[in-house]
């Protein structure tokens, strides 16, 4: 007989942020991963939204709390609050718009200015289904990711291609880091054993994530 676990029964809670230019597909990646939904007519995000989903990593239940905000400056939430406590980030660009790829540098800088150096980062080239409109090659993106020591994947929220893989890979990498440091987690607010809440006010936000191993294959 299957063992029953309540929906909110989890071993770890990880905060992951989505960032990138407006229109690259952040909100649809989130809805695809958390609800298996996609919308062709989604509106620009205003402020902040978040959604959760739990996955299994090894024998543990990892609950991801994924935050999504606007790519457009005027709609964005307060930056420091958005990043606080994040242990993973998906930096999304649109493979059909080269400028969104060039802007990854700016997003990466903002991310690194606001988070622990060992946060797990993945570049995500979304809209890979638009093959005839491609403006950023896989090779260029891969090379950039290698230079910046981040993970990289191409996705399509529309076709549900690699969306599961991208989030799962980031969460597994965070888990790997945290479990390696399992004895040190203590009361760290970002590697939350179940039953605890996020401590937004803490200064030492990502102390559980001390050593990310390697970042590319
Ligand atoms: N073809 C294709 N279209 C996509 C894909 N993902 C998103 N879109 C479309 O791109 C547009 C923008 O998607 P959003 O998810 O709203 O983009 P966003 O990054 O959240 O934008 P902001 O909230 O303004 O920052 C929508 O019309 C989506 O339907 C994809 O994988 N393929
Ligand atoms: Mg959005």
Image: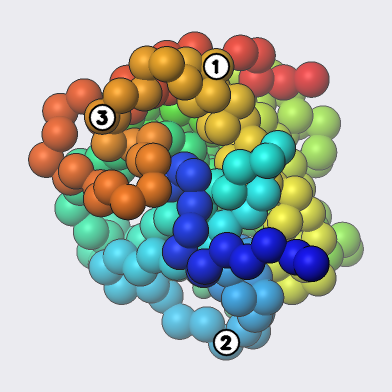
Is there any visible trace of residue 96 in the rendered image?
Answer: no
Residue highlighted by disc 2: 41
Q: Residue at x 49, y 52 (%)?
A: 10
User: Tag 1, which secondary structure?
Assistant: helix
Q: Residue at x 47, y 20 (%)?
A: 182
Horizontal relation, residue 126 to residue 103: left or right: right
For ligand 1, give the image quadrant: bottom right
* CB at disc 2 and ligand 1 closer than 8 Å: yes
Quick check: 87 above or below 6? above
Badge 3, how many Cα within 10 Å: few under 14, some, many 20+? few
Pick whichever of labels 1 and 3 is earlier in the sequence: 1
Quick check: 211 above or below 75? above
User: Tag 2, which secondary structure?
Assistant: loop
Badge 1, how many Cα within 10 Å: few under 14, some, many 20+? some
Residue highlighted by disc 3: 187
Horizontal relation, residue 35 to residue 206: left or right: right
Q: Nearer the viewer, residue 209 or 139?
A: 209
Horizontal relation, residue 175 to residue 2: left or right: left
In the image, residue 46 lies at what x, y percent?
31, 73
Q: Residue at x 18, y 53 (%)?
A: 78
Label drawn at residue 180: 1
Is there any visible trace of residue 193 in the rendered image?
Answer: yes
Q: Residue at x 49, y 44 (%)?
A: 11
Q: Would you identify the image quadrant in which residue 59 lies? A: top right
Colour convention of the picture? rainbow
């Amino acid at each position: 007989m299957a063992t029953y676990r309540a929906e909110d029964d989890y071993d770890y809670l990880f905060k992951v942020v989505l960032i990138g230019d407006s229109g690259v597909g952040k909100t649809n990646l989130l809805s695809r991963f958390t609800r298996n939904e996609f919308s062709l007519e989604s509106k620009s995000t205003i402020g902040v939204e978040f959604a959760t989903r739990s996955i299994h990593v090894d024998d543990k239940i990892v609950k991801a709390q994924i935050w999504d905000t606007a790519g457009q400056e005027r709609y964005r939430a307060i930056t420091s609050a958005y990043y606080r406590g994040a242990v993973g980030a998906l930096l999304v660009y649109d493979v059909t718009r080269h400028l969104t790829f060039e802007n990854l540098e700016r997003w990466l800088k903002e991310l690194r200015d606001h988070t622990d150096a060992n946060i797990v980062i993945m570049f995500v080239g979304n809209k890979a289904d638009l093959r005839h409109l491609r403006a950023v090659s896989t090779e260029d993106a891969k090379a950039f990711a290698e230079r910046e020591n981040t993970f990289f994947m191409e996705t399509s929220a529309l076709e549900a291609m690699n969306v599961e893989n991208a989030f799962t890979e980031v969460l597994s990498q965070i888990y790997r880091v945290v479990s390696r440091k399992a004895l040190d987690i203590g009361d760290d607010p970002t590697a939350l054993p179940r039953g605890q809440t996020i401590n937004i006010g803490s200064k030492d936000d990502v102390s559980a994530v001390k050593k990310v191993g390697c970042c590319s294959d």
